[in-house]
Amino acid sequence: MQVLKFGGSSVADATRMSGVLDIVLAAVERDRCVLVSSAISGCTDALIAIGAETDPARRAQQIDALRRRHHAIAQRLFTGTERREMTDELDTLFEELAAAEPEACVTFGELFSTRILARKFACEGIPTQWLDSRKLVRTLGGVVAEGLTYSGIAAAVAAAPGARLFVAPGFIASDGAGRVTTLGRGGSDYSAALYAAALHAASLEIWTDVPGMMTANPKVVPAAVTIPDISYQAALALAENGAKVLYAPTVKPAMEAGIAFSIRNTFDPKHPGTLISGRPDVKEGAWMGVTSRTLPEKGEAVVCLVGEAVSGRASASSRIRAALSEAGIQPLGDVTGEGDTFFIRVRPTVEQAAVGAIHREFFEHRAVTVIPVFIAGYGAVGHELVRLVGLSADRIARRRGRSIRIMGIADSRRFVIDLRGIRPEEAENRLQGGERAEDGAFIDAVLAAAPRGSVFVDCTDDHHLHLRYAELFRGGLGIVTSNRRSLALPYVQYAALKAEARQNGTFFRYDTTVGNALPILESIASDANCSDGIESIEAVVSCTLNYIITGYDGALRDSLATLLRRAQDEGLTESDPRTDLGGKDVLRKLLILAREAGVPLEADDVEITPILGPEFFDCPLEVFYRRLAEYEPQFIAREAELDAAGQRQRFVASLRRDPAARHGYRAEIKMQRVGPESPFYWISGTENVTVVRSEYSAPLVIKGAGEGVRLAATGIIKDILM
Ligand code: ASP
Ligand code: MG
């Protein structure tokens, strides 16, 4: 017999339940199974609220919301008669819930989830038997009566010799008076261990949403790693002192029955997770994990470090004290504990910092800080970014002592989050099998999962993503964006985002939005923010226009239209290339440049002279291309005239000090004629050139490749590491 337990997030919706289906069907192939399940995520909290609700209308409303969630799952998992029977069965349970005593409400969640699961497996053709844990798991005076429980479970299983799979609700039980009760919050793990012990199970697997027990809470310590093997005692010490991944009472029944059990991740079923056993495969004196919990009534937090067969408590204690003092943390008293467990008390405000410091001392030998990164956008740039991180991670770690760990990726349809890191070569696959990204689900998940010090990268061209930047800043994340749309907002919104980042002690970096990886913005910012005032900024930063103008040879080889189409094919232009020709994209860049120089420029302040008249813009794209061909002779004539004068034309965005203008600067975007004395004259391909003149220093000319996904990705990495 095997026992498999699934937590609330593993059965949260129909998609997750299908994941459970796969895992359990594979297990049933091997041997008979007991599946123990929690309620779907959030359900127990909702039921507690329902139990406490005194207003009948509100209570009915809350019950209905929960009913709808379960119905939605039934809709997705079943069809025809099965669906009807399932919804009827659920409705009967919901009627019982509506009539239930306040304290009984909490016990319904596991009934809902396991009824659905049991029916689903039966539909799959597995001989399935639902077990009523309310009758089988018995408590007396608040503690589980093991003898009674074990014999009840064994008898129930013996009574169904034909069943291949048993499905049992976790968490719920009944007391000495036969009233339904629970095993305490998180109690489903414990239920599973009781089933395993009663049946002398060959294996017990606890499936959850993290990759096993980890050396620390990965939300607090990004560098935390999975503990592959651990003893019952050490696992118990971690669980009792704050590790939420395992409900502490679970350990005892398994240990007494000598059942090794594992904690595994439903999101990554191939990962072996953590094996908890009597004879773990660990070296003596190895460190297992560090955890903590807050004692609000005492106004302190207790940090707990756990090892296996530790010798020399004194030296470990002094390492703990040294690690804290190095981090500037004053402990509240001495190191206590005994055997392999060490306690140190600190103020709650420094709890996480203390865990981090002790983790660094005992678990991070490479002295490398992990930077957790979440990437929105898996187009050309996102793809290249992931690839480049894979290629350069080791070098960056060696040279800069920091390692970029990609923990989340999203495209417009799907997303994947894994705090252990997503390997670049598997990114594509993981994303394919990821969750649906609709309605901002990725940001929600990032906000819930992101460890301290995380960086959110926006390499989408989404128009709305910036609306959630403030939340990300408030969640403590830094943002790196290459999405110009998120900066070319009305100035107040732009300023509000920057302020939000500052107030939350984090950062907002967007160096790639102008001139890609060229250090344009950082140069302007350092000028403008120091004592030197900016006199003017002139920039030739439209890759599309540069490509066309520098590539044009009077239609000898290619017509304007051919060049433009090629630029579009090479991904240089916006989806309608007229956005570039009309100067809109350059306008965004100019706004970003000006604001970086401290000028609160708005789009309306900029005078744009597009290279083509209005008749080119308010027509369908095909008409546009026809007009472009008609216009071509004029363009050739102009080029010839320029040639004769030894000049060239460039599409220049400029900002010049002008006391008469609003904000004291005049901003323009237009074609300009330039001679060989101008830095704009010599440009090849899509090169970008920016000239910054300031009060005291000589003009600064920044010139270089302004285009290319490789450069964009490099620039983003630079921003991440800055
Ligand atoms: N559903 C219960 C709770 O949320 C039991 C469990 O999930 O383990 O506490
Ligand atoms: Mg749980």
Image (cartoon, helix red, strand yellow):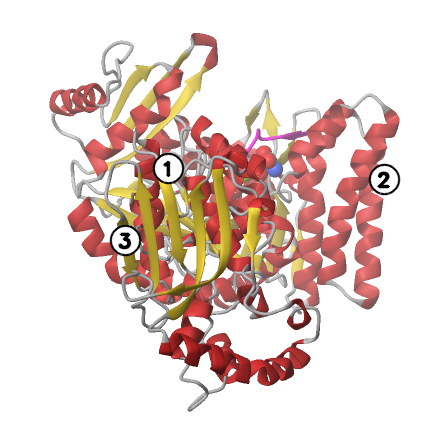
Residue shown at the point (51%, 66%) measured from the top left: 432
Q: How many circles with numbers are drawn on the protein?
A: 3
Q: Amino acid at mark 2?
A: Glu
Residue closest to the eye, 120 or 30 = 120
Residue 389: percent from left, percent from top? 31, 58
Q: Amino acid at mark 3?
A: Val
Does the Cβ of the disc 3 residue fall within 8 Å of ligand 2?
no
Q: Quadrant of the C terminus?
A: top left
What is the CA distance from the residue labelled 3 to the residue labelled 1?
A: 35 Å
Residue closest to the eye, 398 or 182 = 398
Ligand 1 quarter of the rendering: top right
Q: According to the image, label 2 marks what residue?
A: 95
Query: Which label lies toward us, 3 or 2?
Result: 3
Q: According to the image, label 1 marks what residue?
A: 453
Residue shown at the point (45%, 37%) measured from the top left: 246
- Mark 1 and mark 2 lie on one chain; the one further toward the N terminus is 2
Instruction: Identify the element where label 2 is drawn.
Output: helix
Is 421 within the magenta?
no
Instruction: Identify the element where label 3 is drawn.
Output: strand
User: Would residue 721 be found to the left or right of residue 381 on screen?
Assistant: left
